[in-house]
């Protein structure tokens, strides 16, 4: 049976790089046995102030953002709180537990040699009106395509930029702009600046259809998946985003729309300005800090206070989970890391977690930290992640 002091001392030794292989194995074993240590720690009266002091010291020494993931259904165990605290220290120190497996033929322990699953990156492809496709992550900086009055280029920062010469363009096209599409695969994200100056940041497995330039009374585009918009102000020409049967209309503002087909709701999160969200005959106005949600199978619109931090985390390079189910979390993980998720047990889907971690960590770092809570385990087979009790 371990004690709190033994565990903390060994963990700090590991962080300083002084652990032997045997001690690393022992520490990994301790993680699985921490629930058994609960009775001992009850007797020793674990000092939260002591652990808080240790965490604060590491926070001061690091610029990384910590992950503190814990299940919400087993909060009676003190070891869960301590384990979550130690996870924060481990991540701040840049640590990663390396899974090991036993070699049945030799009886020795061998490192897991499965292929590393890397996080997503800036990649997408542009489909022109004539059907030609341009792989944006491979394309060199500079002009990508050109038509009468329209130039499409890739800037030095990788953003796709549309420029339109109104005088020459409208005359050549007789006022009918061509429709382009930018699509991100799973494991991809991308940014585009439309002809009117509107900035669009696409999340993984998403796409937008838009005209090379805007004409008429409205500026309309179509969205599948998720995107963050910074709309250029133009009171005379409302900007309209169509997502399935939902419409979001603005004059100039910042907002996020999540319209993935595998989510039950289409949500709009407003950061500044105001937007009109509608479906059929039902319409509502959103104010900054509010979120509108439309169920994909109904026309009612629910307005609530938005969890802005969690909804916008993907644009800042983080996953942020606030009391979310493992199923919801794994949907985001699946899109960003381009993996398939399988659940071996129905009960495991009921677990809820909270935490923050960089999107650019190895997938195993995220999964290992969730595993530390003791509520789930996992294994990786190729590009399939299997979640189990």
Image: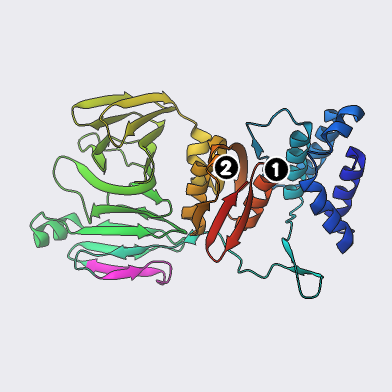
- Relative side of 112 to 197, left or right: right
Mark 1 or mark 2: name the one nearer the start of the chain. Answer: 2
Relative vertical location of residue 152 with respect to residue 95 in this rendering, above or below: below
Q: Where is residue 22 in the image (x, y as percent from the top left)?
A: 88, 61
Query: Which residue occupies 43% across, 58% down?
Result: 186
- Relative side of 89 to 222, left or right: right
Residue 263 lies in the magenta stretch: no
- Which of the 4 quarters of the picture holds residue 166? bottom left
- Relative side of 310 to 278, left or right: right
Q: Where is residue 1 in the image (x, y as percent from the top left)?
A: 90, 42
| Mark 2 residue crowding within 10 angstroms, few (<14) / some (14–19) / many (20+) | some
The front one of 363 and 126 is 363
Q: Can residue 340 be seen in this view?
A: yes
Q: Position of residue 71 (x, y in %)?
A: 64, 36
- Relative side of 288 to 166, left or right: right
The front one of 157 and 74 is 74
Dot 2: element: helix
Dot 1: element: loop
The front one of 384 and 164 is 384
Which residue was labeled with disc 1? 374
Relative vertical location of residue 23 with respect to residue 313 in this rendering, above or below: below
Query: Which residue occupies 37% across, 24% down?
Result: 303
Q: Where is residue 269 in the image (x, y as percent from the top left)?
A: 40, 34
Q: Which mark is residue 228?
A: none
- Which of the 4 quarters of the picture holds residue 239? top left
What's the magenta region? 132-146
Which residue was labeled with disc 2? 348
Q: Can residue 359 be seen in this view?
A: no
Query: Which residue occupies 68% across, 43% down?
Result: 66
Quote the CA–CA distance across marks 1 and 2.
11 Å
């Amino acid at each position: 049976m371990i004690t709190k002091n033994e565990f903390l001392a060994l963990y700090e030794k590991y962080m300083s790089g002084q652990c032997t292989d045997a001690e690393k194995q022992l520490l990994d074993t301790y993680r699985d046995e921490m629930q058994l240590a609960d009775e001992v720690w009850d007797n020793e009266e674990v000092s939260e102030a002591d652990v808080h002091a240790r965490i604060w010291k590491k926070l001061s020494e690091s610029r990384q953002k910590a992950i503190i993931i814990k299940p919400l259904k087993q909060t009676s165990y003190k070891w869960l709180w301590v384990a979550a605290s130690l996870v924060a220290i481990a991540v701040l120190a840049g640590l990663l537990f390396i899974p090991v497996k036993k070699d049945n033929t030799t009886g020795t322990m061998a490192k897991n040699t499965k292929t590393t699953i890397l996080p997503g990156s800036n990649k997408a492809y542009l489909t022109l009106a004539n059907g030609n496709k341009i792989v944006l992550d491979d394309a060199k900086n500079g002009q990508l395509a050109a038509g009468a009055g329209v130039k499409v280029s890739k800037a030095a920062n990788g953003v796709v930029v549309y420029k339109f010469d109104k005088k020459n363009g409208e005359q050549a096209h007789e006022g009918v702009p061509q429709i382009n599409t930018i699509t991100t695969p799973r494991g991809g994200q991308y940014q585009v600046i439309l002809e009117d100056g509107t900035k669009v940041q696409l999340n993984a497995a998403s796409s937008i259809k838009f005209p090379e330039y805007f004409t008429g009374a409205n500026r309309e585009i179509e969205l599948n998946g998720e995107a963050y918009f910074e709309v250029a102000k133009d009171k005379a020409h409302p900007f309209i985003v169509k997502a399935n049967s939902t419409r979001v209309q603005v004059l100039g503002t910042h907002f996020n729309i999540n319209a993935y087909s595998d989510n039950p709701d289409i949500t709009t999160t407003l950061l500044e300005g105001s937007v009109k969200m509608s479906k059929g005959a039902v319409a509502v106005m959103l104010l900054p800090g509010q979120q509108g949600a439309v169920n994909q199978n109904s026309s009612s619109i629910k307005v609530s206070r938005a969890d802005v931090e969690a909804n916008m985390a993907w644009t800042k390079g983080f996953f942020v989970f606030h009391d979310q189910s493992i199923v919801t979390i794994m949907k985001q993980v699946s899109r960003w890391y381009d993996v398939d998720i399988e659940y071996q047990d129905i009960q495991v889907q009921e677990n809820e977690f909270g935490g923050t971690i960089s999107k650019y960590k190895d997938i195993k770092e995220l999964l290992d930290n969730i595993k530390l809570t003791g509520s789930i385990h996992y294994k990786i087979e190729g590009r399939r992640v299997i979640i189990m009790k």
